[in-house]
Amino acid sequence: MTKQPNITVVIPYLNEAESLPELYRWIVSVLDTAALTFELIFVDDGSTDNSWAFVSQTAKQDQRVLGIRFMRNFGKSQALHAGFLQAKGKVVCTMDADLQDSPDELPELYKRITEEGYDMVSGWKKRRYDSYLFKNLPSKVFNWAARKVSGIKLHDFNCGLKAYRYDVIKTVEVYGEMHRYIPVLAKQAGFSRIGEQVVQHQARKYGQSKFGPNRFIKGFLDLISLWFLDRFGRRPMYFFGLMGSIMLLLGFIFSLYLGIDKVIINPGGRLIASRPEFYVALTTMILGSQFFLAGFLAEIILRNRNHKLRYKIKEFIPQNSKGNA
């Protein structure tokens, strides 16, 4: 493909051999009908079934298909990042491979970016076909907390169906398990036009969900990390220095009180080392010094940081120039 395609669809997957053929035909039908040039990037996150066989065979037949295969399972964030590195479309969309996201939404998402000027548009699964107690209710609590912390008014941060301007995916670095918070990462990078679109959610047709309940715990911890990085990521000394100063001040006050009491008020009283206040003063001063040291080290690391994503690609199939357009 010599010209920049209108749209790139990045599809991370894990053991979705049954759904991939149907998903591929569905996407191609929708985008061909909409007269949009496109490329499909399938990222195999360590599948152990026959998923890769379908992707590799399809890539040989269709020049619009590109395949990336990891050595093992590294996670959805790493899969998205690998797809983003290869994406060339003016608009880059992401979607899950389990057929719960509808490709029929792609043309409208493309228009929201190109015609309405959004930097990114996130899907909102307003009506979900998941268990209310184990998925819907925790998801509502999680999204409420994410809105409060980030200030971004989205109903569904973790929806896999999203659309981005090309510049966004080439700027934002998705690492760890931060795929849930790409809207937050985009906002922190300066892309403030973030929209939302109600999308159709479908019941899972094949297989089982690859995400357990622990994803909500990880999600909340990641949210705290993002909040901290947003507030103090550029100057960590502001946080650690403040905490260290407070503790050192408390330790100094206790030490001063003990010294005045022993020398002036009650010279014949107990030894300073036998009083509880002495250990409070000692502990707070030690902790204050450690916070200061942590701040200095964080500032040094910040100036030499280089995020290295921990995944290894086992196979890479470039677009086949001899395939069918």
Image (cartoon, grey):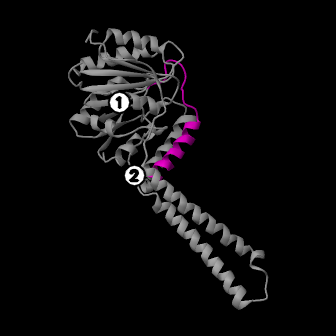
Magenta stretch in the rendered image = 202-229
At which x and y percent is residue 120? Answer: 31, 39
Nearest to N terminus: mark 1 or mark 2: 1
Task: Tell me which residue sits at (42%, 52%) in the image.
Answer: 230
Q: Is residue 312 shown above or below 140? A: above
Amino acid type assigned to the residue bearing label 1 in the image: Leu
The answer, for residue 133, to whether it is visible in the render is no
In-front residue for pair 90/215: 90
Q: Is residue 275 shown above or below 42? A: below
At which x and y percent is residue 176? Answer: 49, 38
Q: Which residue is mark 1?
A: 85
In-front residue for pair 110/296: 296
What is the crowding at mark 2: few (fewer than 14 residues within 10 Å), some, or many (at least 20)?
few
Q: Are marks 1 and 2 in contact (CB under 8 Å)?
A: no
Task: Tell me which residue sits at (44%, 28%) in the image.
Answer: 79
Q: Which residue is mark 2?
A: 151
Which mark identifies residue 168? none
Task: Tell me which residue sits at (39%, 27%) in the image.
Answer: 95
Quick one: quadrant of the N terminus? top left
In-image side of 142 versus 188 (left or right):
right
In-image side of 129 versus 264 (left or right):
left
Amino acid type assigned to the residue bearing label 2 in the image: Gly
- Dot 2 lies on which element? loop
Which tag is nearer the camera, tag 1 or tag 2? 1
